[in-house]
Image: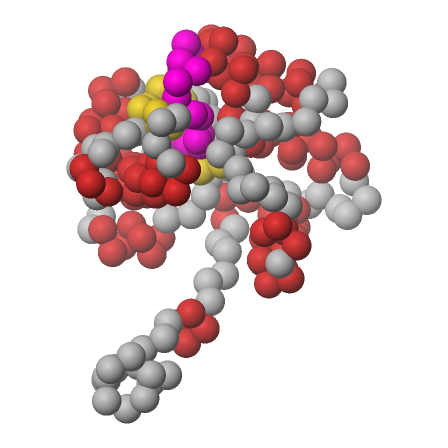
Amino acid sequence: MNVVESIRSRKSIRGYKDDPVPAAVLEELLTIASQAPSSRNFQPWKADVIAGEVLERIKEENVAQLSAGVWPHVEVLAEDPQKEAREPLFRQRQIAVAKQLFGAMRIARGDAWGRQEWMFKGFRFYDAPAVIILSAPDALSGPVMAFNVALFVQSLCLAAMDFQLGTCIAQQGVSYPEVIRRHTGIPESERIIIGISIGYPDPAFAANDVRTEREPLHAFARWHGFGEGSERRPR
């Protein structure tokens, strides 16, 4: 699969087969992803690869924390974490994908148990057989750190498709950093940024068929200096 095909076809996978992902495959993926662009060549990313009993314990403790009413507290947040959700357009898009997912999984609006179970699944990294947690030195400024790690994550997730692997990039699983640190030893000098669920997609899992809509080119691209006005795309 070439890179353009990967970009066009990649989607979040939220249901996985039980088959383990070989360590050798994950090692190769990380090596490939390490070629990602890096601002000033900082290469700040650290990757903790987790599977087996360690992953199961993290999943269990995440759900226990959530069930006990402990508020999620990820380590990479905007000053106002609810600001994005209050923006009407962003909120509209968020609601749209939630409707798609709940519709695919046949979770009705009033199905409190079904919605709770879906939320638990997110905090269990969607029950993937392996997880990669990305962190970076806390000494870096937030934007530099996040930008560099995001490039690494994108590269890894696209490369994964060449190995018939699916991924889901989400913060839910790293919402309790103390749980992650307890089982991985990630030092306090690093900030835990994101988790990537990774495994072989389960074709029978309905939510895996969901594809989110993307805005058309004219809605986000502005053109300048092409001779026919800044709003015209080049021919």
What is the magenta range? Answer: 184-198
Which image quadrant is residue 34 in?
top left
Image coordinates of residue 187 in percent, x first then y, are 40, 13
Q: Nearer the viewer, residue 37 or 106?
A: 37
Residue projecting furthest to the right = 110
Q: Residue at x 46, y 63 (%)?
A: 214
In the image, residue 2 lies in the stretch drawn in magenta = no
Is residue 166 visible to us here? Answer: no
Looking at the image, is 143 positioned above or below residue 222? above
Image coordinates of residue 29 in percent, x first then y, are 24, 30
Q: Which residue is drawn at 35% across and 19% down?
A: 49
Is residue 1 visible to us here? Answer: yes
Q: Which residue is drawn at 24% across and 82% down?
A: 225
- Colour theme: secondary structure
Image coordinates of residue 31 in percent, x first then y, are 19, 29
Looking at the image, is 101 positioned above or below residue 122? below
- The total number of labels drawn is 0
Q: Residue at x 60, y 19 (%)?
A: 62
Image coordinates of residue 122 in percent, x first then y, are 57, 32
Q: What secondary structure predominates along the stretch shown in magenta? A: strand
Image-based side of 5 in relation to 78, left or right: left
Image-based side of 191 in relation to 119, left or right: left
Q: Which of 175 and 136 is in front in this view?
A: 136
Q: Nearer the viewer, residue 39 or 213?
A: 39
In the image, residue 189 lies in the stretch drawn in magenta = yes
Which image quadrant is residue 110 in?
top right
Q: In which quarter of the image is the C terminus?
A: bottom left
